Image (spheres, grey):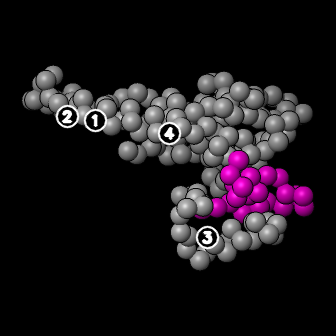
Amino acid sequence: MHITRFTDLSLRVLMYLCARPSQDRTTVTEIAERIGWTRNHVVKVVHRLSQEGWLATQRGRTGGLGLDPQARKLRLGNVIRTLEGDDCLINCKDPPCNFGRGCPLIKVLNDAQNVFYEALNAYTLEDVAQHSVLAHLFAPSSTGKVVPIIPAGVLPNKDQSRNSDDAGLLKLVNEGGI
């Protein structure tokens, strides 16, 4: 399975907002700086997430955006399915497939895709955003400085071995250095 960059960025924005105190509002510019993506990309993502009802936005001088309180309980599989669409993994129409409607591959791939989403539905947005490392890294710092973010693809698991760089970062976070 593969998710689009748009979905990847959407998950990062949702996790960032979920890790923040619920009453805090932020801006698109701040999100872009904190997660390391361009402001233009974040604007598009925030627009879509707002359309889904997952973000609360307010325009104006005292405006900003935040996570809708109910969005904390969103199941990851449902979020990804919504953002990715419910298309089949392969397109049998373009180019046309000569195997026809009776081909068993479609059913196998659809079953696998459903298992993928169900496995992700075992976790909520809050589950992944409240991981101790992410909570420290995404939370606003007391100094107002931008806190470094863990590189993409590094979500520590207590049962998973880490390389020395990850272990050092985790030790720094756990000791309150970040």
Q: Earlier in the sequence, mark 1 or mark 3?
A: 1
Q: Secondary structure at mark 3?
A: helix
Circle 2/circle 1 CB separation < 8 Å = yes
**Mark 3, residue position:** 166
- Name the amino acid, label 4: Leu
- Quadrant housing the N terminus: top left
Secondary element type, mark 2: helix
The rendered magenta stretch, by its main secondary structure, is classed as loop
**Residue 42 figure quarter:** top right
Instruction: Give the quadrant of the C terminus.
Output: bottom right
Query: What amino acid does circle 2 point to?
Result: Leu
Say which residue label 4 marks: 120
- Label 4 and label 1: CA atoms lie apart by 17 Å
Q: Position of residue 147 (x, y in %)?
A: 77, 61
Picture residue at 73% right of the left edge, 29% below the top: 68
Q: Which callout, 4 or 2, points to the residue nearer the camera?
A: 4
Residue shown at the point (65%, 56%) measured from the top left: 36
Q: Which mark is residue 109?
A: 1
- Residue at image position (68%, 68%) is 170
Residue 148 in the image: state x and y as whole percent. Answer: 72, 63
Q: Dot 2: within a 10 Å radius of its alpha carbon, few (fewer than 14), some, or many (20 or more) residues?
A: few
Q: Disc 3 or 2, which lies upstream in sequence?
A: 2
Of helix, strand and loop, which one carries label 4?
helix
Type of amino acid at the residue the image marks with label 1: Leu
In this rendering, does residue 10 appear at all? no
Residue 54 placement: quadrant:
top right
Q: Which residues are magenta?
A: 130-151
Amino acid at dot 3: Asp
Disc number at residue 105?
A: 2
In three-dimensional space, the C-alpha distance between marks 4 and 2, rounded to whole angstroms, equals: 23 Å
Q: Which mark is residue 97?
A: none
